[in-house]
């Protein structure tokens, strides 16, 4: 049994997962304290993790009907993320592992998003193409095995979630913009405005900076009153552009690799329009439950199943990293 801890951004997460990928518990405590600032405030995030981390771990064990004695391995997100936030989870994991003499497994957050769909009940088997679209990252990988993850392409500028959050902000929606933009878009016409989908970017890379600017100009040209009247159309068209940009890259990745299986992850993968668009592809598309798309600790356990544990000295010395991969 693996106990996993994830504190890379503003969600305090802990989960208990069996070695075969069965999720016994998956606790996500969203801090909800950053909304007023229009983005995550690193120092506040770290402090909130300190306040909640123990409670979230206890809750994950309780939900799983397990005790600490039952845990065989402790997995923790090492990076990338906010270092102050990561350190809280890392300290908690180190303390538990060393006090209880349980092996510690460091995990890369992005590998977590890539392998989230390998958890049951989806239990997607490699090889597959993974699309990860979150607030900080947007990329496509080819997954030939849990240890053979190769980057195929990614955003040249903003992440898809970042583009969504910025667009939502321009439309006067609260942070984080994704869920609010999706709700507003539901009542609008996705064909009302022709926003750019980064079509000029060839291959498997993508770009979202032009999209944001296009919305800014559209809002300016419409004026306050007309923008207010057409907010739903703007949201739906904006969302469609993001979805198309991602879906076209997935189609290209399938063509290029010859694979027929796709798995998606990252917060933007919670978006209903993206899910519907990808489901309609002529491929085997694995779409995890929304709670496995946004940040969570079950996905960290999913990776830990396939990663070696550290010896105690290396566990004590383990450091967080802000960006890049291990
Ligand atoms: O993976 P995630 O929870 O955190 C990061 O590692 O970044 O992704 C957060 C991002 C935010 O930009 C948020 O607006 C977006 O995912 N998001 C959504 C939806 N839910 C969350 N975007 C579109 N539609 C949603 N329903
Ligand atoms: Zn994430």
Image (cartoon, helix red, strand yellow):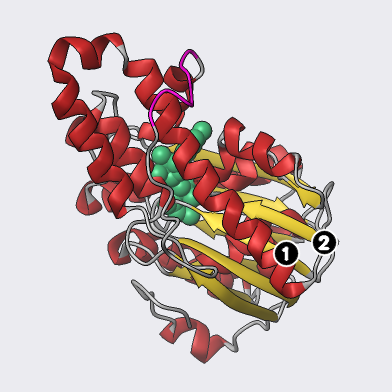
Taking the spot 70% from the left edge, 72% from the top edge, the residue there is 256
Residue 107 can be seen in this image: no
Q: Main secondary structure of the magenta part?
A: loop
Q: What residue range appears in magenta?
A: 187-193
Screen quadrant of the N terminus: bottom right
Residue 103: x and y in percent read 65, 77
- Mark 2 neighbour density, 10 Å: few (under 14) some (14–19) many (20 or more): some
Q: Relative to 78, is 89 above or below?
A: above
Element type at marker 2?
A: loop
Q: Relative to 223, is 86 above or below?
A: below
Query: Which disc is residue 260 wearing?
Result: 2
Residue 293: x and y in percent read 59, 46
As drawn, is 279 to the left or to the right of 299?
Answer: right
Q: Nearer the viewer, residue 100 or 194?
A: 194
Q: Assess whether mark 1 and mark 2 are in contact (beta carbons under 8 angstroms).
A: yes
Nearest to N terminus: mark 2 or mark 1? 1
């Amino acid at each position: 049994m693996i106990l996993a801890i994830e504190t890379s951004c503003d969600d305090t997460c802990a989960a208990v997962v069996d070695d075969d990928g069965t999720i016994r518990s998956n606790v996500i405590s969203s801090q909800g304290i950053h909304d007023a600032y229009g983005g995550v405030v690193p120092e506040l995030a770290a402090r909130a993790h300190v306040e909640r981390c123990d409670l979230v771990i206890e809750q994950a064990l309780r939900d799983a009907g397990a005790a600490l004695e039952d845990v065989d391995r402790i997995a923790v997100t090492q990076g990338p993320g906010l270092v102050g936030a990561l350190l809280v989870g890392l300290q908690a994991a180190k303390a538990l592992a060393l006090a209880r003499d349980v092996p510690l497994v460091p995990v890369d957050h992005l590998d977590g998003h890539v392998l989230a769909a390998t958890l049951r009940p989806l239990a997607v088997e490699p090889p597959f193409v993974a699309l990860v679209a979150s607030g900080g990252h947007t990329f496509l990988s080819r997954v030939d095995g849990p240890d053979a993850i190769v980057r195929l392409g990614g955003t040249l500028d903003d992440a898809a979630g970042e583009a969504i959050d910025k667009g939502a902000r321009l439309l006067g929606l609260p942070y984080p913009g994704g869920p609010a933009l999706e709700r507003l878009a539901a009542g609008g016409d996705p064909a009302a405005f022709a926003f750019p989908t980064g079509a000029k970017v060839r291959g498997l890379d993508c770009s979202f900076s032009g999209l944001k600017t296009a919305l800014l100009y559209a809002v300016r040209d419409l004026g306050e009153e007309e923008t207010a009247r057409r907010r739903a159309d703007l949201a739906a068209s904006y969302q469609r552009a993001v979805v198309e940009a991602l879906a076209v890259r997935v189609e290209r990745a399938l063509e290029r690799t010859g694979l027929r299986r796709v798995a998606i992850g990252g917060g933007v993968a919670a978006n209903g329009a993206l899910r519907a668009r990808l489901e309609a592809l002529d491929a085997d598309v694995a779409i995890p439950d929304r709670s496995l798309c946004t940040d969570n600790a079950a996905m960290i356990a999913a990776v830990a199943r396939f990663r070696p544990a550290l010896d105690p000295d290396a566990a004590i010395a383990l450091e967080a990293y802000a960006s890049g991969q291990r």
